[in-house]
Amino acid sequence: MRPDEDTDALAAELALRVLSPADEADAQARAKRDPEFRAHVDAWNARLAALADELEPVEPSPGVWPRVEAGLPAPAAANDNHRVVFWRRWALASTGLLAASLAAVAVLASRPEPATSPASGEAIAVTRVATLTLQGADAPAMTIAYDSATGSLYLSPTDKMAGDPRVPHLWLLLPDGTPQLVGPINGVEVSTHSLKGTPLSELAASRAASVAVSMEQPGHTPGANRPDGPVVAAGDLQSI
Amino acid sequence: MTAILTRDQLAEALGRTAQGDRAAFRRVYEATSAKLLGVCLRILSDRQLAEDVLQDTYLTVWKRAGAFDPARASPITWLVTIARNRSIDRLRSGGPVRKAVSVDDALEVADGAPLASERVEQGDEARRLNGCLDELDEKVARCIRTAFFEGVTYEVLAEREGAPLGTMKSWIRRGLQRLKACLEP
């Protein structure tokens, strides 16, 4: 085989995914550093992808999109031109700095004296926080923080809910104990939900007394005022 | 909820997704998630696992949308490739055990080529690809299909066909070369 044919053959094998793990790792490393080789791989992907045309489409369960959405970084600012704000938040969430600043907020919240401002003032002006603990075990399951100015709800779960096939749903609890559904959340990774412009934003800002997480079957959406699955974690929502 | 988008509309929605436009991202999801779940399910044979990987696939799409170049790839090819690769990665990660495949499903899996009557829905590219696969040795075409749809390596293919590993490699390599020549005469 000529060298260029050899290159193309390897690209085809990488695209088809028939190589052994060791050979595949080598080929992937080459694709990263060799644009010409990568172009061969792309061309093979394009040729082979047409095979997927014969597969029947399968409509995903309604629960998949909320899980995708919950996994996205902080939402774009209300004004779409505010790209700078969006990217700063995105960077914050994706580098784990958000998780770090939430931890700082939680520490501040546990002090007897109200904190004058969160440790990290950048893009976050948190007014209420909660640490949810697992029911039946005194282990933290998640830290949440709410910014009433922007309506952003930041969620930073621990690893306690990882591996559960059910979908965690977040609830705000009014002082009389009435739950109000916020929606499905990501139980594994840091995520942000925007409550801006919804009736929930006012509840989260002042009226809600605590928060809870229920575990619902995949694809199932509980009623707005009543979880159907078990409540696995809860905590008081404190003002700071 | 499957919305029909043209190739250009889909490419544009991906471009907007790259800029952080969630509504555009949602349009991409609505137009393509059923197709991509079909791909994940074919490789993983387990609905829940496939939906997990589908979720993962779209998070990858969100992150990598900036790398999509409409001049170099069709949007659906790009998406199918991500879904297939994520599914194969999960299959090989030694994660949750794959659900046993029923005999009927296994037979369906073994019977690679679709009937001509089942191909009416296919696009031009798929028709050409299948035409070219039909020109290969039947056994080689079957191995290429199995590799695509099940994400198995040379080693597994050789075992299944009762052929030496080296023989399987040269079958597939030559088969793919002929396939390319047939597609781009």
Image (cartoon, helix red, strand yellow):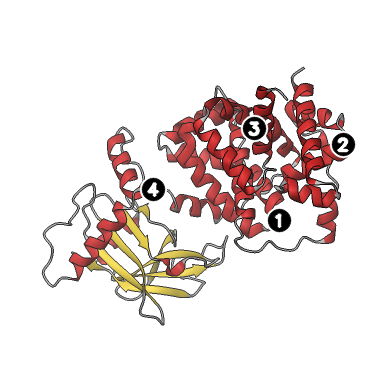
Mark 3 crowdedness (10 Å alpha carbons): few <14, some 14-19, many ≥20: many
**Comes first in the chain, label 3 or label 4:** 3
Check disc 3 and report the residue beneath it.
A11
Residue at image mark 1: B45
Q: Would you name the residue on which mark 2 appears?
A: B117
Q: Tag 1: Cα neighbours inside 10 Å, few (<14), some, or many (≥20)? A: some
Q: Are marks 3 and 4 on the same chain?
A: yes
SS label for mark 4 = loop
Q: Chain of mark 2?
A: B
Residue located at (86% from left, 54% from top) = B107
- Amino acid type shown at disc 2: Ser
Tell me how far mark 1 sits from mark 4, CA to CA: 30 Å
The quadrant in which residue B91 appears is bottom right
**Furthest residue in direction bottom, as rendered:** A136
Amino acid type, callout 1: Ser
Residue at 49 percent across and 46 percent down: it is B59
Residue highlighted by disc 4: A73
Residue A239 in sight in this render = no
Tell me the CA gap for discs 2 and 4: 45 Å
Q: Is residue B52 left or right of residue A126?
A: right
